[in-house]
Amino acid sequence: MKYDVAGASFNVQIEGAGDPVLFVHGFPLSGKLWEHQVAAMRGSHRLIVPDLRGLGQSTLGSAPDMARYADDLAAILDQVKINGAVTLVGLSMGGYVAFEFFRRHPKRLKALVLADTRADADPPAKSAERETLAQKVLKEGSKVVADGMAKVLFHPECDPALKKEWHTIMAASPSEGVAAALRAMGKRADSTPTLKTIKLPTCIIVGDKDVITPPEVAKAMHEAIPNSKLQVIPKSGHMTPVEQPGAFNKVLKEFLKS
Ligand code: MLT
């Protein structure tokens, strides 16, 4: 389905019926990240799976910050007529958006799943690196990001075909949206002070071999969020929903049932 929000056209997959679950992908990915969760849960839940502004098949409109990404999601929920609170499942950059969504639209949330993400902001050197990369992407295309990300996203023994598939997807991401996302991540707020204010049931998931947001980072979030549980997924890097879909789905379904 296509939805227009604040100057952009959003590609949103909507499936199933039941308690609503909003899936928010990471960088520089798309809603396809959640294909195994959609297949496993369309029989039991209402699933809302957008491509974020400027990524996948959603257009960029104007350059977003984290607040814009969060407000886009709230506007999409309005248009899909999801009036009750949702469980938001966010991976990595999707988690950065989830923190902003929590601050801006707390009444729309009933639970949080924070997968392979972190609460702190970029240190200045990392923000500067993102700006340099954004400029390179605008000149040379998204393949430069895909080449770098494909090396660090996956567990070292991950199926090469899966890596190749995601390299192709990332390289095809619209370069203006990729550059905009890099800049938005580089300027994001520190969400560490937010953690202790999250009173929602929260499930933190991390791959045991995630080098981008490692298990120690997930453990620190778990210790700071009062009503949270931590699940470490074995034999997985940063891409837990596609590297270990069976284990990810089991954790997610049990959490949603509880
Ligand atoms: C992501 O997976 O969304 C990114 O790796 C997050 C980041 O670069 O901080």
Image (cartoon, helix red, strand yellow):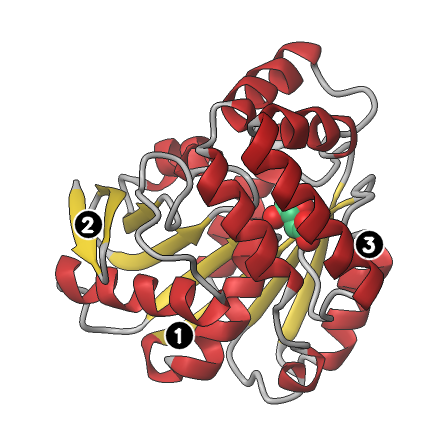
Local secondary structure at mark 3: helix
Local secondary structure at mark 1: strand
- From where the camera sits, is residue 231 visible? yes
Query: Which residue corresponds to mark 2?
Result: 17
| Residue at image location 33% in from the left, 62% down from the top | 73
Give the number of the disc on residue 48: none
| Image coordinates for residue 103, horizontal then vertical, percent | 48, 82
In the picture, which quadrant includes the N terminus?
A: top left
Q: Horizontal placement of 70 versus 135: left or right?
A: left
**Whether the residue under disc 3 has CB within 8 Å of ligand 1:** no
Q: Horizontal placement of 214 versus 180: left or right?
A: right
Q: Earlier in the sequence, mark 1 or mark 2?
A: 2
Q: CA distance from mark 1 to mark 2?
A: 17 Å
Local secondary structure at mark 2: loop
Give the answer, above or below, for where 38 lies relative to 141: below
Q: Nearer the viewer, residue 41 or 92?
A: 92
Viewer-nearest of discs 2 and 3: 3
Give the number of the disc on residue 110: 1
Which amino acid, mark 1?
Answer: Lys
Q: Earlier in the sequence, mark 3 or mark 1?
A: 1
| Residue at image location 41% in from the left, 81% down from the top | 104
Q: Earlier in the sequence, mark 2 or mark 3?
A: 2
Labels 2 & 3 near each other (Cβ < 8 A): no
Q: Horizontal placement of 204 versus 21: left or right?
A: right
| Image coordinates for residue 218, horizontal then vertical, percent | 76, 61
Q: Nearer the viewer, residue 81 or 143?
A: 143
Which amino acid, mark 2?
Answer: Ala
**Whether the residue under disc 2 has CB within 8 Å of ligand 1:** no
Q: CA distance from mark 3 to mark 1?
A: 25 Å
Give the answer, above or below, for where 62 lies relative to 211: below
Query: Which residue corresponds to mark 3?
Result: 215
Which amino acid, mark 3?
Answer: Pro
